[in-house]
Image (cartoon, rainbow, N blue to C red):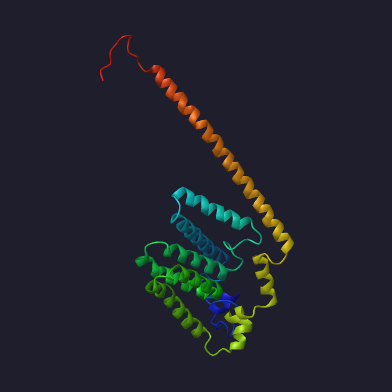
Amino acid sequence: MVPWRIAQGERLYRDVQFQHGPLAPWLGAASDHAFGRSLPARTSLAALLALLHLVALDSLSRRFLSVWRAALATSVAVAVAVFLRPGGWLFPFSFDCAIAVTALTWALALTAGDRERSDGLAGFCLLAALLARVEIGLAGVAILALAARREPIRLLRLTFFPLTAGAVAYGAVSLGIPVDRLVSDGWLCVIDPPEAFRRVYRAYAGLDRIGLRSAELALAFIVLALIAALVCATAAIAARRRPTRHWRRQAIIFRQWPTPPLGHHVPV
């Protein structure tokens, strides 16, 4: 509903209430303006975003692992995010959050590569995260600042542009709108979230039902411990069998080796 109203010419935060950054409504409005109120178009946009996130996860994994291990790590991350309640952060509950997480993942993947070529792209990804969800974008700024804390020039390159451009963008969309309204119904809602938001945040943090979440963590720890024990046992069995086969091959080779006749002198 929000993207469609923006596509019809209404102004975000003044005419249309929205509690997060402007990027997601703008993308949705662009889709509605191009294709109309089309469910397949919106679904395709969301699927493209999910695919970009998977590619970012795989790219980040390949910085530290081989191709096959990176694919396995990405698959495990997807499986964990799908089956964990309430869904993890891989496929979040809102389009703006999905954009922010995807952009932040790409920023982390790019900063792990060639600095000269990728730092600029990482800055744009960080800007996208800031414009989608300001709190997630600021968390990304803190992460990249920590990673580049010993390199002042790189720190400036990674954080100055996203923060400056984000401040200009938020200032432009907030022009003429009272601060109280932005706090209650706009992107500054993060300062004082409504009770409904607080309940969602507590659920995602696992603080809504401490006993149940603790039991879930304990069960997950037990399952991981069993898997680790199975892997260790399999490795131990394989290690024991391998020398036996090796010595059997050596014995066969020794038996087939021709021996000199008795009394034959082998020169030294």
Q: Residue at x 49, y 72 (%)?
A: 141
Q: In the rendered view, would you say 51 is above or below 66?
A: below
Tell me, yes or no, if residue 21 can be seen here: yes
Residue 28 pos. (x, y %): 54, 72
Q: Does 128 appear above or below 253? A: below
The answer to which quarter of the image holds residue 230 is top right
Which picture quadrant has residue 195? bottom right
Frontmost residue, 136 versus 39:
136
| Image mark count | 0
Q: Is residue 257 left or right of residue 53?
A: left
Residue nearer the viewer, 18 or 115: 115
Q: Residue drawn at (52%, 88%), measured in percent from left and top?
A: 175
Name of the residue lying farthest toward the top: 262
Residue under the point 54% across and 64% down: 46
Residue at the extreme front:
268
Depth order, front residue of 116/179: 116
Quadrant, the C terminus? top left
Residue 18 place in picture, x, y as percent:
60, 78
In-image side of 31 versus 209 (left or right)? left
User: Residue 185 at x, y = what percent?
Assistant: 62, 82
Residue 32 appears anywhere in the view: no
